[in-house]
């Protein structure tokens, strides 16, 4: 079982920046991709950014040019640099990982970290 531990959420004013971190526990599973999703009150969870094991990234249109996802050298740590934050970015942010166990695949989620952009 792979566990994801998130860090870095908090309060920030519009125009500010935050950096989220996500660290995966060690396991026999291979992490083949990581990503960040978010869920605002009364809204569905939505994709924010993903990064594949090859370093390919995708972003939601609403965060392109403002957010940047990256992984550390061991690729079991993912970070999300968030700049120029707006109140619309307020949500619980969840780390996600796609896993490969030999020929089997699974996924896992972190517990979520709150990001609040307040006026």
Image (spheres, grey):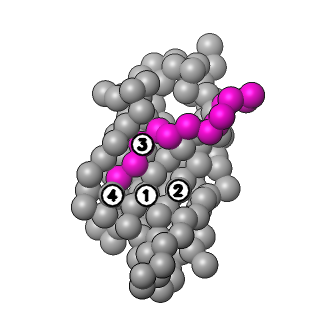
Mark 2, Cα crowd under 10 Å, few <14 / some 14-19 / many 20+, is many
**Residue 96 marker:** 2
According to the image, label 3 marks what residue? 49
Of marks 3 and 1, which one's residue comes earlier in the chain?
1
Compared with residue 112, is residue 29 higher up or lower down, i.e. above or below?
Answer: below
- Eyeballing the image, is 36 above or below 78? above
Residue behind mark 4: 52
Q: Is residue 83 in sight in this rendering? A: no
| Dot 1 or dot 2, earlier in sequence | 1
Q: Name the residue under label 1.
A: 34
Residue lying at 51% horizontally and 83% vertically, measured from the top left: 27
Q: Quadrant of residue 63?
A: top left
Span shown in magenta: 39-51
How far apart are the two marked residues, 4 and 2, measured between alpha carbons? 12 Å
Q: Where is residue 107 in the image (x, y as percent from the top left)?
A: 54, 65
Residue 96 as seen in the image, left or right of residue 91 = left
Do the residues bearing badges 4 and 2 touch, measured as CB atoms within 8 Å? no
């Amino acid at each position: 079982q792979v566990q994801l531990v998130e860090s870095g959420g908090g309060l920030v004013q519009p125009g500010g920046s935050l950096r989220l971190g996500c660290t995966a526990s060690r396991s026999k599973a291979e992490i083949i991709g990581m990503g960040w999703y978010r869920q605002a009150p009364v809204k569905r969870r939505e994709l924010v950014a993903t990064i594949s094991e090859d370093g390919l990234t995708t972003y939601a249109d609403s965060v392109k040019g403002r957010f940047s996802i990256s992984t550390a050298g061991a690729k079991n740590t993912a970070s999300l640099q968030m700049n120029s934050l707006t109140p619309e970015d307020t949500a619980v942010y969840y780390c996600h990982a796609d896993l490969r166990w030999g020929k089997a695949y699974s996924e896992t989620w972190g517990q979520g970290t709150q990001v609040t952009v307040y006026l």
